[in-house]
């Protein structure tokens, strides 16, 4: 297992729409294991393959306090969104930015697990937020896309300043 | 998504706690949820502001209402809570006023409501300009933040004592512990506390120690091994006054969180068998954990105590401890959210539940056995009047006078009012079944 590098906004790959997994084989399982390790090390509660530059519809999540309830999502689909809730979100690819995002409060998740078996899960609370956030990543969407234009511009300005301060001119140009 | 949410200042956290209580959550639950979001260095301030905000909410609500052109929208309840917390801080704490105001303004930003900074600043500066705004109202109800319905009933029940009762709700209770006398003497434990730099003095109950200042339980020597439990002295008396005979069969009905079950098991010479019944499965689990910490044995049953057909094996009990569900009006100083969460209709339902429990458990008593009816309430319809009604229903019953060294006789029982001899408000009635004394 290895920890992977997490791409940082505004890396253009974060806008890539990931391709479905055809078969859940050892290569996919190795990716899942590396992603879990990367997520726990971050520390994070969710990570999508797009964030580590891999073109697969794979995400891992663990919202438990004890960090021992990993959830593996392969080719996830969200159906039956219900209600609406607001939760403060952040992103491992956009460090230091936390904003309230409004999304459906409950969703039903259909996905394959680490062994390729299909499962269905009805979720709410933080888990629902996290699942929607990670599935967004697989579609090339970021949580800041869901903010008002004004808020988003303010965040981008702040991030630009921060990058200049950090002297990372390469990313700022990208 | 990242694991950690952004930290928020203590004042914003306290506002969230106060707003959560307005939505029906308990203070403990709300604090538990918010605490991890506040930096460790600020958690003591969070605790102080949250408790203070809850204790004085009803006192400062009218002050605030007078200064707002219109009430807050439901989604801005956290701002209202933030202002109430700030009023508490300005009136009751020693924070310099500019620091309290700036803190509240900054907290509005942390709550994601930067637009309200001007409003928060304006309201609080307006309050500071008016020397009378923060003065305590003359009547005890307003000064100590009581809801009208409860204040009226208590003033009727306790006309002489009402002013003291009112003030007790905003007083800080002592931290009292019960030494496990089965394992260590009280004097020896005082020495262990002294070695750990914790000052304590003995209470009237044989195992009671009152700490000079509250400490985290982890600082109590031998806490995890069960040498000591946190329990108010009034609650300790409920078990002591029952007079459990050596080898006797004892029932602890409505047992969670298990403080009294543990106490029953610590009594020497020991009772023969202890049955603890609790209806809530989550609380039953915590009861088991508590008993495991004390390494004591009791038969724990998760059941509705009134449904005796479902859980009772038919063997009568020599003693029954019925620490009945109640309004908690005697422990408001420890649980200030009680005044904000209780509704008048709750009391009617509680009175009925208490009567049902008394009627259901009474037949389980062996001839000559005794039942201790106890509540942490100071409402007479839950206490003296409840017992009076029971005695009318049950002919062959004698009330045995008990004396916890404080309080006053009330009807067939004894009432301690909150703060008397440093204790929580509590009621005890010891009822003996007909037949030879056991």
Image (spheres, rainbow, N blue to C red):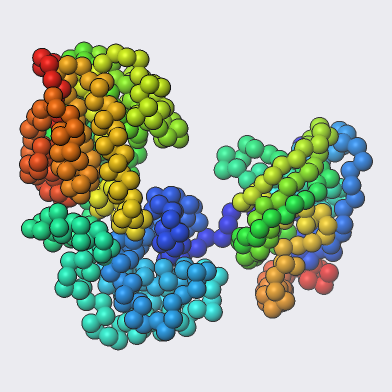
Looking at this view, name the residue that lies furthest to the right.
Answer: A22
Give the number of marks.
Answer: 0
| In the image: residue B322, left or right of residue B119 | left
Residue B40 in the image: state x and y as whole percent: 44, 55
Residue B305 in the image: state x and y as whole percent: 35, 29
- When asked about the image quadrant of residue B132, the answer is bottom left
Q: Quarter of the image containing the N terminus of chain A? A: top right
Q: Nearer the viewer, residue B419 or B278?
A: B278
Tell me what residue is drawn at x 53 percent, y 73 percent.
Answer: B113
- When asked about the image quadrant of residue B341, the answer is bottom left
Q: Quarter of the image containing the C terminus of chain A? A: bottom right
| In the image: residue B414, left or right of residue B83 | left
Residue B124 in the image: state x and y as whole percent: 37, 80
Note whether B314 is above or below A6 in the view shown.
above
- When asked about the image quadrant of residue B318, the answer is top left
User: In this orientation, does residue B183 appear?
Assistant: no
| In the image: residue A48, left or right of residue B198 | right
Q: Nearer the viewer, residue B321 or A170?
A: B321
Tell me what residue is drawn at x 57 percent, y 39 percent.
Answer: A66
Residue B21 in the image: state x and y as whole percent: 41, 58
Note whether B284 is above or below A52 in the view shown.
above
Q: Nearer the viewer, residue B221 or B372?
A: B372
User: In this orientation, does residue B348 appear?
Assistant: yes
Tell me what residue is drawn at x 87 percent, y 59 percent.
Answer: A16
Tell me what residue is drawn at x 35 percent, y 34 percent.
Answer: B256
């Amino acid at each position: 297992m290895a920890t992977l590098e997490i791409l940082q906004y505004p890396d253009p790959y974060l806008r890539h729409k990931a391709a479905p997994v055809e078969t859940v084989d050892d290569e996919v399982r190795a990716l899942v294991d590396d992603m879990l390790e990367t997520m726990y090390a971050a520390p994070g509660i969710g990570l999508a393959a797009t964030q580590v530059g891999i073109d697969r519809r794979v995400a891992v999540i663990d919202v438990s306090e004890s960090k021992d309830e990993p959830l593996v999502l392969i080719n996830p689909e969200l159906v039956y969104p219900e209600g609406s809730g607001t939760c403060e979100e952040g992103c491992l690819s956009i460090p230091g930015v936390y904003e309230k995002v409004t999304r459906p409060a409950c969703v039903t998740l259909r996905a394959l697990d680490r062994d390729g078996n299909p499962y269905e899960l009805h979720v709410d609370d933080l888990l629902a937020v996290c699942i929607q956030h990670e599935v967004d990543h697989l579609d090339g969407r970021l949580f800041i896309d869901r903010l008002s234009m004004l808020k988003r511009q303010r965040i981008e300005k702040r991030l630009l300043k921060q990058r200049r301060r950090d002297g990372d001119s390469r990313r700022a140009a990208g | 998504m990242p694991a950690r949410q952004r930290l928020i200042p203590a004042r914003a956290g306290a506002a969230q706690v106060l707003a959560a209580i307005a939505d029906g959550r308990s203070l403990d639950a709300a604090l538990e949820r918010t605490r991890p979001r506040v930096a460790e260095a600020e958690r003591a301030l969070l605790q102080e502001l949250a408790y203070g905000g809850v204790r004085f909410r009803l006192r400062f609500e009218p002050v605030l209402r007078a200064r707002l052109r219109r009430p807050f929208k439901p989604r801005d309840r956290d701002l209202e809570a933030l202002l109430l917390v700030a009023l508490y801080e300005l009136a009751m704490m020693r924070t310099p006023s500019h620091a309290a105001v700036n803190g509240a303004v900054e907290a509005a930003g942390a709550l994601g409501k930067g637009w309200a900074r001007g409003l928060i600043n304006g309201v609080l500066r307006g309050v500071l300009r008016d020397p009378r705004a923060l003065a305590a109202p003359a009547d005890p109800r307003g000064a100590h933040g009581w809801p009208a319905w409860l204040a009226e009933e208590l003033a009727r029940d306790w006309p002489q004592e009402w002013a003291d009762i009112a003030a007790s709700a905003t007083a800080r209770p002592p931290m009292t512990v019960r030494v496990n006398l089965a394992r260590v003497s009280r004097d020896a434990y005082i020495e262990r506390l002294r070695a750990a730099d914790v000052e304590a003095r003995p209470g009237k109950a044989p195992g009671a120690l009152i700490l000079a200042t509250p400490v985290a339980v982890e600082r109590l020597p031998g806490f995890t091994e069960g040498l000591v439990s946190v329990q108010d002295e009034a609650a300790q008396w409920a078990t002591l006054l029952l007079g459990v005979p050596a080898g006797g069969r004892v029932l602890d009905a409505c047992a969670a969180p298990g403080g009294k079950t543990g106490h029953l098991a610590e009594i020497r010479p020991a009772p023969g068998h202890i049955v603890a019944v609790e209806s809530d499965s989550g609380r039953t689990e915590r009861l088991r954990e508590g008993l495991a910490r004390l390494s004591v044995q009791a038969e724990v049953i998760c059941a509705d105590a009134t449904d005796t057909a479902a859980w009772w094996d038919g063997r009568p009990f020599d003693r029954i401890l019925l620490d009945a569900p109640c309004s908690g009006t005697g422990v408001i100083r420890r649980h200030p959210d009680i005044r904000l969460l209780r509704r008048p209709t709750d009391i009617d339902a509680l009175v009925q539940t208490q009567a049902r429990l008394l009627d259901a458990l009474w037949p389980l008593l062996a001839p000559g056995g005794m039942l201790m009816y106890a509540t942490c309430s100071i409402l007479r319809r839950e206490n003296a009047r409840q017992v009076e009604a029971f005695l009318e229903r049950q002919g062959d019953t004698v009330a045995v006078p008990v004396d916890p060294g404080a309080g006053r006789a009330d009807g067939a029982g004894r009432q301690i009012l909150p703060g008397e001899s440093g204790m929580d408000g509590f009621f005890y009635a010891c009822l003996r079944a007909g037949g030879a004394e056991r």
